[in-house]
Amino acid sequence: MAVFSVLLLLPFATLAYILSEEATKTIKSSIEASTSQTIEQFASHVGTLLTQVEDAGNQVVSARTTQEWLTVHLNPDSTIQERVLTKQRLREYFSSYAVNNSSGISISAFVEDTGGVWTQDKSYKNSEWFQGFITENKRWTTAHKDVDQSDEFMRSRLINSFIFPLVQLQSLKNMGFIKVNYPTTLLRNAIEKIHVGKTGKVVLMTHDGNSVLDQNLSEDRDMLKMGLQQIDVRYDGDVSGIFPMDVKGETNLLFFRKLPAQNWTIIGSVPEAELYEKITQIRKTMLAVTILLLVVAIVVAFWLSAGITKPLSVMGRAMKHVERGEFHQALQVIPNAGEGHSEVNYVTAVFKQMTHRLRYLIETEFETNLRRKNAEYKALLLQINPHFYNNTLEIISGLAAMRREDLVMDATEALGKMMRYSLNLGSDLVRVAEEMAYIRDYLFILHLRHEERLQVVKEEDPAAADFLIAKFIIQPLVENAVKYSLEKHGVARIVLRTKLKEDKLLISVKDNGIGMSPDLVQNLLDELKSADSVAILSTEGQSIGLRNVLSRCRLNYGELFQFELQSKLGEGTELNLILPLIRS
């Protein structure tokens, strides 16, 4: 009962923990991705606006009206009337541009000797934005007010600006600068709509920690400056990211997106506990539900196990005996069906009957399988090509007619040893050395027939000689190799190897014959995987020798048998039989 209770407890606890962790990760990822996406959208909005502002600066500087005003201003011989007239045209051009621009962009121009084009006032030189432009080449300004505007409304509003050199294109002389202004509210209204948690905020900051849009940083200023420093140190090569930062014992999450062209950073901060408040609530709810389910499950488990555990434990021991094939011991252990839980009694009775039946079927199947396997083996041995013996007798007859008594004796002796070896069916397994001796006699007779057209290289590993293999599995492979190599080239080059390799016995036959098609190779491999023995009698003569060998190897070695086949049409074939080691 204790084990049963623990088995109930562990899955529930593990499942609750995994679900809680996965839910936390998913929700965190969703929140972080959503916030990052929102900041990325704002960054895209900023990039679009600032590109428009930069394009406006280029357009204004290269405009004909601007260049005419600069030309007159540079010419010492120009009259006051010409200067006044060109400046008036420039003002009209700037006003027209501002009126027609939907983003509220306005233009100011400043030259060294006369000041701003709207006020002719040189007080701008004392402004913070001008000092930043002169000393640090800051061309993008923070929020400020500028009196050099066309009307009172524009003078009273907060603006941000882009400062563009004012160059007379003919002489390439720098006369001052163009100041392209856009309302701070264009970006400030958009950034203040971004909400991160309840108290989190997103601000647009310069590299030195100042607000670009005159946002109220209040007590967050120091934390945001520290965040900018960490971004420079830890995320120097990254454009955006998320990282935690501890401030006064509280962990805050900081989201950032760099704007490299302006050297600005969009940075958002929010307390981690506030951002993941919903996740915490979900985890607490899941924990409470899990504990409740555990209590209910344990109570039910104790109630059920009182009448079921004991008989099932006894049946479990009986099943272990059945698993090991000990049917007599299992039948002694199985309890008799009695009164009590009817379902358990029914299962017990059925299992007892099943055990009796299973023992009978296994014994019957075992005997049947032995008879079938022996019959298949004998049938497969009969597939060895009988034409070889006829051809050998014709060779001996020809040698006798040529009065080659020495070769007649050798050939007759070789054939006799082969016949004795073939007719000895007392054992299915023979030593490798015996099988190779049979192959040497076989090759001797083939040499008598084909002479120099047959070239065989034998590489025999002495360490493999005493291991046992299935009888007659090498000769059909050699026969096929010789046959198909002579058909293609007229000269058969055969390599026969036996070798011990990684606790396996390798038998390899390689030829220079006609090779096999990819379809035939695949069919042979599929046949080997799909059945206990390869169907030979239905092959209609296609690769019957090889199929004979594969089938007999599968019958003798079962799943321990491995086969490798490499063949290309017109190039030859290499067969590798990989067999388990059986000691004599």
Image (tube, grey):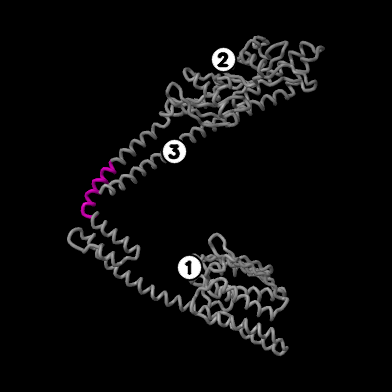
**Vertical order, 226 against 20 (above or below):** above
Viewed as shown, does residue 155 lie left or right of 7? Answer: right
Q: Position of residue 141 (x, y in %)?
A: 61, 19
Q: Label 3 to label 1, Cα distance in Å?
A: 49 Å
In three-dimensional space, the C-alpha distance between marks 2 and 3, rounded to whole angstroms, equals 49 Å
Q: Is residue 584 visible in the rendered structure shown here?
A: yes
State the mark number for residue 25.
3
Is 344 situated above or below 58? below
Magenta residues span 292-308
Foreground mark, 2 or 3, reads: 3
Q: Position of residue 450 (x, y in %)?
A: 70, 79
Q: Which mark is residue 558?
A: 1
Tell me the residue that label 2 is attached to. Answer: 156
Q: Secondary structure at mark 2?
A: helix
Three-letter amino acid code of the residue under disc 3: Lys
The local crowd at label 3, few if under 14, some if 14 to 19, many if 20 or more residues have their Cα within 10 Å, is few
Labels 3 and 1: the sequence-earlier one? 3
